[in-house]
Image: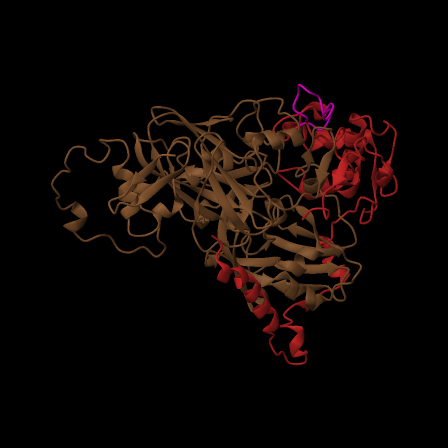
Chain colours: A red, B brown
Amino acid sequence: MCMRKMSTYNKTLGAAALMFAFGVAGANAADGPHFGQPISPADLAPWDISIGPDGVGLPAGSGTPAQGAQVYADHGCAACHGDKGSGGSGGPLVGGGPLNAPDKEAQKLIGNYWPYATTVFDFIRRAMPWQQPKTLSDNDVYAVTAYILALNKIVGEEDVINAETLPKVKMPNRDGFIIRYPEKH
Amino acid sequence: MRSRRNPRGEDAPQVAANGLLDRRALLGRGALIAGAMTAGAAGSLTGAAAEPLSNGPWSLAPGVPVPPYGQPSKYEAKVVRTLSNPKLESRTSGARTPHHLLNGTITPNGLHFVVARGGETNVDPETHRFVIHGLVKQPMVWTVDALHRYPMVSRITFLECGGNSAPLYSKEPIQASVQALHGLSSCAEWTGVLLSTLLDEVGVDPKAKWMIAESADLPTMNRSIPVAKAWDDAMIALYQNGEALNPSNGYPMRLLLPGYEGNMNVKWLRRIKLVESPVMAINESKQYTILLASGKAWQFYYPQEVKSFITRPSPGVNLQGPGFYEITGIAYSGNGRISKVEISADGGKSWARAALNEPVLSKAFTRFRLPWNWDGRPVVLQSRATDEAGNVQPTREALIADRGPPRSTPNVLAFPMEHFNAITSWGVDAKGEVSHVYA
């Protein structure tokens, strides 16, 4: 029941759009419209918050679990995540258990599931606290990251977390993933 | 197999068990339908005579001024999304499409499904900016107005949350509507600028194999996407079904990656960074990873694979006595066109091929229909879709063998599994009531 005539419909539209290039003063007509404005890395830095699993993009600063406990208290994190990350509307930050227990639905938590510690820092910095995201200092984000990792016994109570040490933290489930792309797409 | 005779003396054959008729019995002239109905259970067409006709009040007085923006009839007030977080607590907000109350293939903008980590947000198009940077010759920023000056393309495509249909991964069949079970998928016509046009403008470094797309709302959500998708069919969508994007769906711009997991189609898009390798965002290393029976998980599982479900009848859309019904529903595949949908009324033992409404578009909702003569006995209805790549929608049993058995019967709003595209079964009892069953 496929409608054969429609089979090329979208491709034709796409190709037509690509070929339909505007002539712009000073630009090669074949290059396209050119309505973007150049921007320098310095000017886009406030938005360039990406952090790779290798630590690329991590800012200066540092924090310890003890400092993080204070940040956790000061910013009311327990309202959504419970005392010492025990859980609430925002989910628990500790525990998790085995991922293939026969009798219990697996929980995908930081300690038992997340493959990279950099993701913890990244998510807190961009999205937490939920009511006032992007208000913590980088030192505070390092500290609360250290606190959560220590609650999960992944780092020690005295460990200092910074741009050098965070990417070196080996998460327990680091090798728990099978990359699906591009094997099947 | 028994056959039915229509008034012209032709067979309207039953093509599969329990009254499934030939799909062509629907097409044109109505004669075959009438034949099928006449042959149906006696009494359903020859009830009490209709009442005499009279003029309603709308025939006797003027209406009201035509509104500047039209709303559905007040008699359709129940056709709404169901909300998972109506009070905007500090968690994700979901809104599900009422598939059982809609028909055709296009989801109205106000009924398109939504998953929003920080609720609906209103981005001002005057001050919004979109930037492409990273491994490019020249980082560039665009205003919304500037993007509207580019040549545009339109395509009809579905979007589906990776967690749609998750309630089927449950020990016991969860009794809920098709909206609750499958409501996190929708289909619209999207219009905008091909991402490849903008990538050509910034000049992509051949080292860039991935791009990070990021939103402008509260969680500033980010996802890693293979650059290959940009050269294929990725779009910066500005319009949804002819009007500017709905705020819930990313106004003033969203990324559209036809066929790929909904979460990757970043709404309120503000930034794309070209990089060498994935960024390992929370939404690709915790959420949207698929845990297998072994305890290992698939990561970067992108296409929403072939799926179908029957919308009528369905739980809450019950049968009213034996006789003629049209079985209808939706099929789609992130890998291309739907090539075939089959219907079973005996729990998957025999199958009848359904008619597909044209046009059948790649990576779009396809409406299927099949005439059915219900004899009043209990049946189990199923639909099974096949896409043009040859992927066949799996049975629930087969998919669970892959993923491991569900351990519990969670809340219908929970997401115990992702990318769950198994066949759905509706049980119809002798009273015509429809329930969710495992078959």
Q: Quadrant of the N terminus of chain B?
A: top left
Q: Residue furthest top?
A: A103
Residue A154: image x %, image y %?
83, 29
Q: Residue furthest bottom?
A: A25
Q: Is B264 placed above or below B293 here?
A: below
Is A133 on the left-hand or right-hand side of A174?
A: left
Residue B368: image x %, image y %?
44, 45
Q: Is A82 placed above or below B290 here?
A: above
Q: What range is drawn magenta here?
A: A92-106
Q: Name the dominant secondary structure of the magenta segment.
A: loop
Q: Is A15 placed above or below A85 here?
A: below
Residue A23: image x %, image y %?
61, 79
| Residue B365 visible in this rendered orientation of the protein | yes
Q: Quadrant of residue B428?
A: top left
Residue B14: image x %, image y %?
37, 38
| Residue B119 visible in this rendered orientation of the protein | no
Query: Does A71 lie within the magenta span?
Result: no
Is B274 on the left-hand or right-hand side of B374?
A: right
State the residue at coordinates (73%, 29%): B295
In terms of depth relative to the viewer, which is nearer, A41 or B230?
B230
Q: Quadrant of residue B194?
A: bottom right
Is B277 on the left-hand or right-hand side of B424?
A: right
State the residue at coordinates (55%, 66%): A12
Q: How many marks?
A: 0
State the residue at coordinates (53%, 36%): B88
Q: Quadrant of residue B51?
A: top left
Query: Does A94 lie within the magenta span?
Result: yes
